[in-house]
Amino acid sequence: MARYTGAVCKLCRREETKLFLKGNRCYSNKCSIERGASLPGKNVKTARIKKLSTYGIRLREKQKLRKYYGLLERQFKNYFQKAERKKGITGENLLELLERRLDNMVYRFGITKSRAQARQLILHSHILVNGKKVNIPSYQVNVNDIIEIKEKSKNIEEFKEIKEGKIEINVPSWLEFDTEKLKGKILRFPSKEELNLPIEEKLVVEYYSR
């Protein structure tokens, strides 16, 4: 499976916003955005302030959303095309499809600190959906689905720390999670306002509709 293998902090610097790609580092003072790092390949003192065109603004919003969920260009475009075919508002359909990815849900439950780590867990067959092993990060979950850690995997040190309360997790209101059983349930899908993304999805729609 193709994936980005470069420095993820560079992606945040390019978009000049936190995309929460590095786990714990994103919440510490080591974060490149917190330290005021410059754009990749540019020096703060010599970089020119260049005003983006309308196309450039839309492109940057598309890139931010794509990188936020850790997708490659073709994957992201496929999601947009699916969102277009669905009834409703295309931008909100797109966000729902992205949120329904299994790797995103594992991350939302607080089991991992990043979506990349969630993808690794899924690929290594540590995750069950409704009692069945699923090793496809892009698997689309549904409301009332049960997502849990496989029994044999519960002895992994990080999972033991979650069970013992040594690692605090914050679960959003549209999900519920049992730390003792390492099992979560999807109560509903979030609204655009609840996601509070640093992205204008309408500009993404405009980018593809140009």
Image (tube, rainbow, N blue to C red):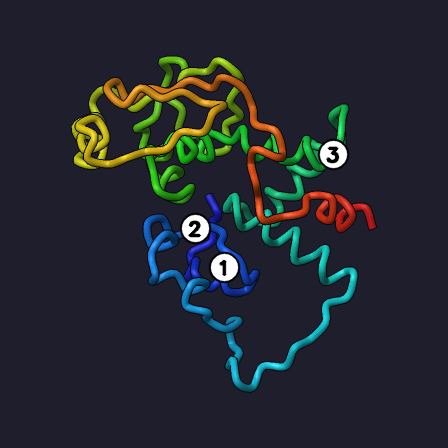
- What's the mark number on residue 90? 3
Q: Quadrant of residue 168?
A: top left
Task: Name the foreground residue: 68 vs 121.
Answer: 68
Relative horizontal placement of residue 53, taking residue 36 as reference (left or right): right
Instruction: Give the CA separation, mark 3 to mark 1.
Output: 26 Å
* Badge 3 amino acid: Thr
Residue 42, compared with residue 115, is above or below; it is below
Q: For the view shown, which residue lies furthest in the bottom direction? A: 46
Q: Earlier in the sequence, mark 1 or mark 2?
A: 1
Mark 3 secondary-structure assignment: helix
**Disc 2 from disc 3: Cα separation:** 25 Å
Name the kind of residue labelled 1 in the image.
Cys
In x, y percent, where is residue 57? 71, 59
Give the residue drawn at x 52%, y 47%: 68
Read off the residue under disc 2: 21
Count of numbered badges drawn on the protein: 3
Residue neighbourhood size for the residue with mark 1, other residues' Cα within 10 Å, grouped as few (<14), some (14–19), many (≥20) = many
Name the residue: 68% across, 43% down. Answer: 201
- The vertical placement of 124 against 54, above or below, is above
Under mark 2, the amino acid is Leu
Disc nearer the start of the sequence (2/3): 2
Name which of mark 3 and mark 1 comes first in the sequence. 1
Say whether residue 179 is left or right of residue 155. Answer: right
Q: Could you say which disc has been placed on residue 12 in the image?
A: 1
Separation (CA) of disc 1 from disc 2: 8 Å
Is residue 4 positioned above or below 49 on the image?
Answer: above
Residue 54 percent coordinates (x, y): 78, 61
Circles 1 and 2: CB atoms closer than 8 Å: yes
Q: Residue at x 75, y 31 (%)?
A: 89
Disc 1 secondary structure class: helix
Residue 150 at x, y = what percent? 27, 22
